[in-house]
Amino acid sequence: MGEPADSASIEGSSSDKVSLISHPSSGRVLCIGGGNVTRVSTLLQHSQYQVSKLAAASPDDHITKLVATFIPDIVFVNLASDDDRSLSILELLAYDRRTNGIPIVAAIGPEVPEARCIEAYGRSSCDFVRADATATEILAKTHLLLRLARSRSPAPAVVASAPSNERAANDDAQAIRLLDHDTGLCTKEYLYHRISSEVTRARRYERSLSVLAIRCGAQNSPAAHRSIAGKLRGILRRPDVVANFGENCWVALLPEAEVSDINSLMERLRAELADFGACAFGRAGLDHDSGMGAHTPEELIHAARKKCDAGDSPPTSA
């Protein structure tokens, strides 16, 4: 069966790009690679989406330029179990300034191990779709992502020093200031906005999600705050989101982190921040038991800050 007339390839020619930009459709989707993304691509083509394809072997700059030219509503990337190129593409699209405002979805099959998905999320904060899901599930997810993408207003400009975890793809219809310009970290408002989507994602995929609150002595000067921010950026992972909550309190959102397994992180932070006075920590995990759990975004942040004030700290080394 041939492809619908509204489908095209953007492997290279300028005429293809011109036709893609001018051709109307119910939704613009770019599929990169073959394998698990092939079924998704075929299904969307026959559901009146404007689908274009790009080889995973294309050079990095070629990929980002074509994606930026096509301006898709969604990008699906084949996540192979034994090809690091797919991980590189996910990361490239997530952090290149030309493409980081576009939702990215990794298409996975039953052969892709869980560890591979965790690595993909850690490197790109991508969403996922199972290529062996029912057609209804794939179409429903695509339609939801399309609606979210089209409901967003233009993302606020992000300065060159913006942390890489500040993805415009997470912006909603309300303008949210992403950066605290004094420290270069995310704003408290953005962290509250981001944690809602992370709670949804964690429950959907049955993944871990933790929040860590940190209080550093009594360092109130802007210079001290900038120095603390620099140390936090150097220790935390790229998908983590950290914001200054005022009153010497910092809150970090830690996707894919089990609350009971972050003692080593707390110890490292204690050592790195020792010059700023005694540090207190508080942690909370989504739906965690043993008294360290919370069930809503607001409860997670509140629980972590409350435990921080109560002195929830890791065991000190002997």
Image: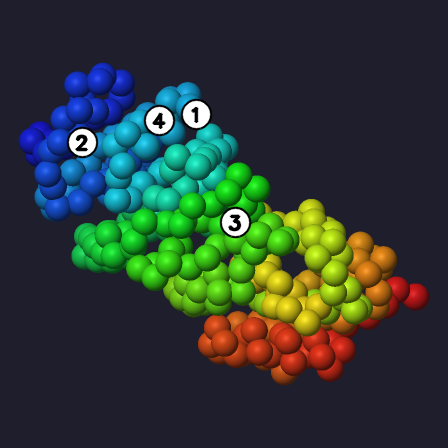
Alpha carbons under labels 1 and 3: distance apart: 20 Å
Point out the image quarter for the N terminus.
top left
Question: Which amino acid, by three-letter code, is at mark 1?
Answer: Asp
For residue 170, side relative to residue 5 (left or right): right
Precedes in sequence: disc 1 or disc 3: 1
Q: Which mark sits nearer the N-terminus, 1 or 2?
A: 2
How far across and down, in percent of the image, does residue 5 sit?
7, 31
Q: Secondary structure at mark 4?
A: helix
Residue underneath mark 1? 60
In space, the residues marked 1 and 2 are separated at their CA atoms by: 21 Å
Looking at the image, tell me whether mark 4 or mark 1 is earlier in sequence order: 1
Residue that carries the numbered disc 3 in the rendered image: 165
Label 4 sits on what residue type?
Lys
Look at the numbered discs 4 and 2 and tell me whether their residues touch, using CB distance below 8 Å: no
Instruction: Give whichever of discs 3 and 2 has the lower sequence position.
Output: 2
Disc 4 from disc 1: Cα separation: 9 Å
Q: Mark 4 or mark 2: which comes first in sequence?
A: 2
Q: Looking at the picture, how far across and down is residue 26, in whole percent?
A: 13, 46
Indicate which disc residue 65 carries: 4
48 on left or right of 152: left
Q: Nearer the viewer, mark 1 or mark 2?
A: 2
Amino acid at the residue labelled 2: Ile
Q: Residues within 10 Å of mark 4 (few under 14, many from 20)?
A: few
x, y percent for residue 250: 65, 65
